[in-house]
Image (cartoon, rainbow, N blue to C red):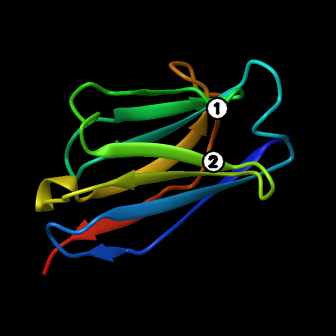
Amino acid sequence: QVQLQESGPGLVEPSQALSLTCTVSGGSITANYYAWSWIRQPPGKGLEWMGVIGYDGSTYYNPSLKRRSSISRDTSKNQFSLQLSSVTPEDTAVYYCARGKSDFDSWGQGTQVTVSS
């Protein structure tokens, strides 16, 4: 059974970059046809899909975040990462990694990121 675990700083200053990593166990991020997403939920709001990296390394982003987002991977560590640049307090949210592109069958527990000075 695949398991995902997010890691990264809980506090980021405005205008800085947010960097999160998702470590996957129980399955390879390069396994055929799987995709791996980042999703966030701001306080009091719904889930927002941010972007995805495919088994082949291809990436797709939410158009509203594309300019500031970058998803990469380290296949040797079975990890994929999110970088979000120029953060503002509106980027405060619980950030999740998950397996899938639109339907998600496995989720990490989520990590709180607060943007504040």
For marks 2 and 1 on the same chain, the one whose residue lies earlier in the sequence? 1
Examine the rendered structure and indicate whether residue 105 appears above or below residue 2: above
Check disc 1 and report its element: helix, strand or loop. loop
Residue at the spot x=29%, y=64% of the render? 17
Numbered circles on residues, count: 2
Check disc 2 and report its element: helix, strand or loop. strand
Residue at the spot x=47%, y=41% of the render? 38
Rendered location of residue 61, percent (x, y) = 38, 29
Amino acid type indicated by mark 2: Arg
Rendered location of residue 73, percent (x, y) = 63, 48
Instruction: Look at the image and tell me in which quarter the N terminus lies.
Output: top right
Q: In the rendered structure, are the residues bearing label 2 and label 1 in contact, judged by CB atoms less than 8 Å apart? A: yes
Q: Residue furthest bottom?
A: 117
Residue at the spot x=83%, y=29% of the render? 31
Horizontal side of residue 26 vs 3, given as left or right: right
Which quadrant of the view contains residue 106?
top right
Q: Which mark is residue 69?
A: none
Which quadrant of the view contains residue 46?
top left
Horizontal side of residue 14 vs 75, given as left or right: left
Q: Report how far apart the C-alphas of labels 2 and 1 lie in the structure.
A: 8 Å
Examine the rendered structure and indicate whether residue 71 appears above or below residue 11: above
Rendered location of residue 92, percent (x, y) = 23, 59
Amino acid type indicated by mark 1: Gly
Rendered location of residue 117, percent (x, y) = 13, 81
Task: Return the residue at label 2.
Answer: 73
Examine the rendered structure and indicate whether residue 49 appears above or below residue 39: above
Task: Return the residue at label 1.
Answer: 57
